[in-house]
Amino acid sequence: MSKLAAQGAGPLAGVRVVEIAGLGPTPYAAMILADMGAEVTRIERPGATHLVPQSPDFLNRSRDFVELDLKEPEALHLAKELIAKADVLIEGLRPGVMEKNGLGPEVALALNPRIIYGRMTGWGQSGPLAKTAGHDINYIALTGALHAIGSEDAPTVPLNLLGDFGGGSLFLVTGILAALFHAARTGEGQVVDAAITDGTLHLLTLQHSLMHSGLWRDRRATNILDGTAPFYTTYECADGEYIAVGCLEPHFYALFIEGLGLDINELPPQMNSKEWPKLRQHFAQRIKAHSRDHWERVFAGTDACVTPVLSLTEAKAHPHNKERRAFAEIDDIEQPAPAPRLSKTQSSIRGNAPEQPVSAEKVLARWSQPPAASTMSARTMSAD
């Protein structure tokens, strides 16, 4: 296992983050900040088990960790010292647990008035469900998102991308960056309450807008973007593989029809939803006659919005992803590269997750020195 690369390259270089170890959306948010150059140190319980029990654990890349039993007075003191020197704290425990551990927002802001206290939960810090257990599937169910996805027969679980990482991690990161900007101008820290339910509802803004405009039915498998439309769905090919079709616009749709070898004038109008089942069956029969590779060749370089449905392994080898260097190889281990891409301050993976902890004292000694760079840190910016 290689040592973490030197600090100082990314847009968040100089920003110091204390991460309280958690699952799923919390380490993913910390990973994003670390890839962007923040110096993140995770606090773990001694002997803690991980979601990914064996190396490599990609979500814990680009940062080191210390082991502290916060029930012990000395360990709690060390944690408070780290918080006093940090710009950001991230935690994903149930509401009240950090307060019980003696590290709630009031304590943290008293130690460090400029700190951004990021709280990642499923239900949020308040509300009747706040202290109950849940997972991604429960959060997206309560927001209406799960109800809207799937076939007429049953909802389809969209992995944990929509809730945990989309509605959770990305909104936590957005809140932290906004709060860092505020702290850089004023020196004032604050609490970021990132609830997966809040974020998922926010992601559904378009659907709510369409529904209020009469353009979206609150019923699964009846809408243009939920896989019902024959021009926005997937089709099985002769080899059992699939292609994805997304030709919403009329001129893209015309190219799709041309690629299938059909005459658009002999077909019902694209937006005649009453004819969609017949049209879909017609397309399905035509596409099932040839392999996925055949259709990929037919539509290559066109604007018909047709792509192969690739497996996770196949995606690594696709020419577009390879040219974009969408996967990075660290210690001979291939994994998704940081995103988005900045032209001047590039993000980077500074190493795979280390297997051994460092001492809290070592981190404190390092953090006692001025940061190498501090584009967003309140330490080096005067308040107006």
Image (cartoon, helix red, strand yellow):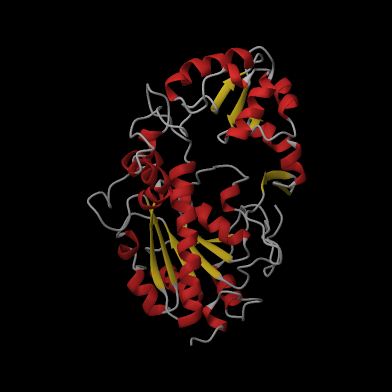
Residue at 63 percent across and 67 percent down: it is: 11
Q: Nearer the viewer, residue 114 or 302?
A: 302
Inspect this view and state whether residue 68 appears.
no
Please give left or right for residue 162 compared with residue 31 in the image.
Answer: left
Q: Residue furthest left?
A: 128
Q: Quadrant of residue 251?
A: top right
Inspect this view and state whether residue 301 appears.
yes
Q: Examine the rendered structure and indicate whether residue 300 appears above or below residue 114.
A: above
Q: Quadrant of residue 108?
A: bottom left
Please give left or right for residue 272 compared with residue 33 in the image.
Answer: left
Q: State the image coordinates of residue 140 (x, y, percent, origin top left).
A: 37, 41
Q: How many marks?
A: 0
Residue at 72 percent across and 33 percent down: it is: 302
Q: State the image coordinates of residue 83 (x, y, percent, origin top left).
A: 46, 72
Q: Examine the rendered structure and indicate whether residue 251 appears above or below residue 260.
A: below
Q: Nearer the viewer, residue 377 or 286?
A: 286
Q: Nearer the viewer, residue 242 or 264?
A: 264
Residue at 74 percent across and 47 percent down: it is: 325
Q: State the image coordinates of residue 336 (x, y, percent, origin top left).
A: 65, 46
Q: Residue furthest front?
A: 265
Q: Nearer the viewer, residue 107 or 76?
A: 107
Q: Examine the rendered structure and indicate whether residue 152 appears above or below residue 288.
A: below
Q: Quadrant of residue 148?
A: top left
Q: State the image coordinates of residue 152 (x, y, percent, origin top left).
A: 38, 23
Residue at 44 percent across and 25 percent down: it is: 273
